[in-house]
Amino acid sequence: MVFSDARRELREQIQLVAETERYDATLASDPSIVPSERALAERRRKGSRKAELLTKYELA
C-alpha cells in the first residue's frame, strides 16, 4: 500500500512537472497570450502540489 501510494504520487510529480513546464514555456514564448484567472489558479495549484510532493519525498 505504501509503495503503491509513493509510486502514484511520484508519477503525479512527473506529470505535474511536464504540464507546468509546457504551460510556462508557452507563456514565455508568446507574450501576447493572456491566461485566464482559472488558468492561473490551476497553475498555482499545480505549483503548490509539486512543492508538497518535493518536500514529502525530500527531493528538494
Image: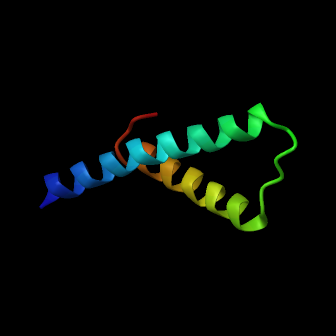
Looking at the image, residue 47 lies above or below residue 25: below
Looking at the image, residue 21 lies above or below residue 1: above
Please tell me how many numbered marks the rendered image carries: 0
Identity of the residue drawn at 85% across and 38% down: 31
Report whether 13 appears left or right of 19.
left
Quarter containing the N terminus: bottom left
Quick one: 2 or 38, which is closer to the camera?
38
Looking at the image, residue 36 lies above or below residue 18: below
Residue 24, given in percent of the width and then of the height, sits at 67, 40
Looking at the image, residue 39 lies above or below residue 53: below
Report whether 26 appears left or right of 5.
right
Residue extending furthest toward the left: 1
Residue 25, given in percent of the width and then of the height, sits at 66, 34
Residue 4, given in percent of the width and then of the height, sits at 16, 55
Identity of the residue drawn at 55% across and 55% down: 46
Quick one: 25 or 42, which is closer to the camera?
25
Quick one: 55 or 33, which is closer to the camera?
33
Q: How is the image coloured?
A: rainbow
Identity of the residue drawn at 49% across and 41% down: 17
Identity of the residue drawn at 31% across and 47% down: 11
Residue extending furthest toward the right: 32
Report whether 25 appears left or right of 30.
left
